Image (tube, coloured by chain):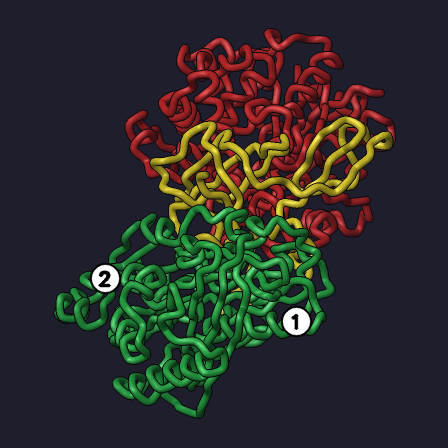
Amino acid sequence: MRRVAIIGVGCSKFGELWDMGFRDIVISAGIEALEDAGLEGREIEAVYAGNMSAGRYIGQEHIASLIADYSGLAELHVPCVRVEAGDASGGVALRQAYMAVASGMHDVVIAAGAEKVTDVPNAMEILSSSADVEWEVFNGANLPALYAMIARMHMKRFGTKEEDLAMVSVKNHKNATLNPKAMFRREISLETALNSPYVAEPLKLFDCAPICDGASVVILASEEVARRYTDTPIYIKACTQASDYMALHSRRDVTTMDAVVFASREAYRIAKIEPKDVDFAEVHDSFTIAEIIAYEDLGFAKKGEGAKLIREGVTALDGDLPVNTSGGLKAFGHAVGATGIRQAVEIALQLRGDAGKRQVDGEIGLSLNIGGTGATAVVTIFSR
Amino acid sequence: MVGIVSYGTYIPKYRIKVEEIARIWGENADVLKKGLGVEQKSVPSWDEDTATIAVECAREALRRAKIDPKRIGAVFVGSESHPYAVKPTGTIVAEALGIGNDYFCADLEFACKAGTTAMQICYAMVKAGLIDYGIAIGADTSQSRPGDPLEYTAGAGGACFIVGRDCIAEIEGTFSFASDTPDFWRREGKPYPSHGGRFTGQPAYFRHIVEATKGLLDKLGLRPSDFDYAVFHQPNGKFPIRVAQILGFTKDQIKQGLVVPYIGNTYSGSSMIGLASVLDVAKPGERILLTSFGSGAGSDAFSFVVTDRIEGIERNPKVLEKIKECEYVDYGLYVKLRRKIRFG
Amino acid sequence: MLPKFWRKIRSRYNLIGSHCENCGSYFYPPRNICPKCRRKGKVREVQFSGYGKVLSWSVVHDGVENFWLSKPYIVALIELDEGAKIVAPLDCNPDEVREGMRVKAVFRKFGEDGEDGIIYYGTKFVPV
């Protein structure tokens, strides 16, 4: 297996992009990434595109070729693959792209993620199809309700409080103020978060990430090729993926995402590091409880002690282990299939020292992208 | 010996009081309560309909009967509020009971007497040796136009009777009386029924119940005093008391089966829930009269003789206990639950 | 939606799941393959008693379309007495739900495929 590096990153603005269609959003991220890498376009050998539900969100399938086409690659006839794994689609696309380069099959590939959700009124209903539609959603349990049941059990078992969840939201909103592309660039107070209405008790409005439009692109190259294009290649030390039971009720333990535990242990093993070696991370805070559980399942905290990290400021921008420096899904926005790639963009920017006002120190960054309530988890470890 | 093998009932938990409805329409609640002999009525929840009520009462009957569901050979559901205009409620019930696929089935409609007619069909089929057990259900979530006098009484509920040979109450005889009397009707595609006002009384309710009951008594050579209990269809609290009087039955005989003051008129479920309430307390050897009434119009009369087996069947919770367990709703919630508001 | 709903009617109307005779595990909804024993598994159909207890729950304010008339409604993670777990609607007052509360299955309407479409029925739970 060859070492694989990120040589360019691009990201559209995330949010309700009323004046931009799916193609416009993808192009804005794609062009930025090509410019960032200094590529003409001809160098691209394959495209891996993460997208959860273009069929339902925009009524268009076959979007991998569409993306390549509107990225100006049609006449190059490169193979394009759409990857779907719920809201872990981006993470899985990254892994497919990574494997294509690591294996020696390709030298330069695009890993993209894109979702246009605001053309339809039922964005949450569609995202909820990343849970078990027949045996969860049909029974009234959409994604917020499922995460709410996770949260209630975590609170009951470990004493996690609604305040702890609110603090995650406050932190991520604060980080997003420093990120020009974030959807919500305003600080919120703990009171605002705590006083927001319940969506699915105990989760409130400010515990739920907004589903939004957005696209992200990273360009991967083999180590040898990467050196030709950049002085600051960001290496992918490990990119692992694990799955679990589709439905929450089938899982071994509702308060643990075994897929995250499994994928992260494997990633640490491959990268030859331990959780304590991670300097900063982007985790899948589609709901605030998910960030707290991620602390535990990634090994940053013992099971049940995730809330301590947020209470003690460990994961704040100026803490020992900053998490979601971008603003996270909560404040940067959750563009579903784009999120996994968007996380990689943030980590690459941070490791390159290009993260502007939200720059943190660190050698090793980690990203965690989750599909549904944890039926898919992708963990990626990056280093300079 | 063919008769009732087991029975079950279901009454939705919500109730609305006559006062609450009267408040909306500017009527005098005391006058209405006195005139109708009804205090309140049952209201189905947003997720309850005739099919769910039928399933719940049938499941109770089957549980009490302790018989293999596969031995049920027929399912007849009587209602005037079947959830579908075309597509049987009976197959929904049969599937939910797990009786398999070889069964006789159809939905019946004869205003408030379709359930007792279902009982007659099951009785005949068991007697003829076509089936071992038949399920007869009367269930309704009865409709009433907002502001119509019917709104004070149109309730929801149902009862199921499993008919077979090893019975707790033998059907000693049955007799029906019918005529083309349009006292109450609902035209195809209309949401609410219409009625002939006071015409629903003498030429309809009273005439049919009296004639059917007399016909049965003549056929069996019995007199009112031979019965320990009598149950008549109960569209309100007044009619059954008066018809009992006309026929020579006492208030004591009808008291146990008179459930309408607390749950309203449950239409196809009405007289059948009354019968269930009587079976809740009946002792071996006792004789029970049941006469239903369905507008349009007709009455089915039955005479039951309670057998020793009644001691061996679970009869709790009793109908009168179920009636007491309730939660009151206001008129606003009532119109939402009953979907009386147009959504678009 | 029609064939998709119809196909699973048996398991929706009644809690019909599966039981692996090799390892003793119970599953709902039914599975063809035991995830513990895989090829060694002996999976048989089983009808659950319909009794269980609440492990976790949520009072849902912003829920699925078919439940909009009952907002807020409760969904619960329920452990059936046989051991299988299920996520299902729980019909009771939000104030009365407790962890460990005993519940039983009831037959209820889930919604409909529009005003002209078929009606969906299935299993909900109520406090015992």
| Secondary structure found at label 2 | loop
Q: Quadrant location of the N terminus of chain A?
A: top right
Relative image position of residue B164 (x, y in whole percent): 62, 63
Residue name at image x 68 percent, y 36 percent: C27
Q: Chain of mark 1?
A: B
Residue name at image x 62 percent, y 55 percent: B97
The color chain C is rendered in: yellow
For mark 1, does the 10 Å Cα neighbourhood hold few (<14), some (14 to 19), or many (20 or more) residues? Answer: some
Q: Please determine whether, in this image, residue C83 is positioned above or below residue A65.
A: above
Q: Is residue B48 visible?
A: yes
Question: In the picture, residue B87 is in which quadrant?
Answer: bottom right
Residue underneath mark 2: B39
Q: Amino acid at mark 1?
A: Lys
Q: Please determine whether, in this image, residue A41 is positioned above or below residue A104.
A: below
Relative image position of residue A180 (x, y in whole percent): 45, 33
Question: In the picture, residue A100 is in which quadrant?
Answer: top right
What numbered label is drawn on residue B127?
1
Q: Quadrant location of the C terminus of chain A?
A: top right
Which chain did the renderer colour red?
A
In this view of the protein, which residue sits in the foreground, C3 or B169?
B169
Q: CA distance from mark 2 to mark 1?
A: 41 Å
- Would you say A173 lies left or right of A81 here? left
Which chain did the renderer colour green?
B
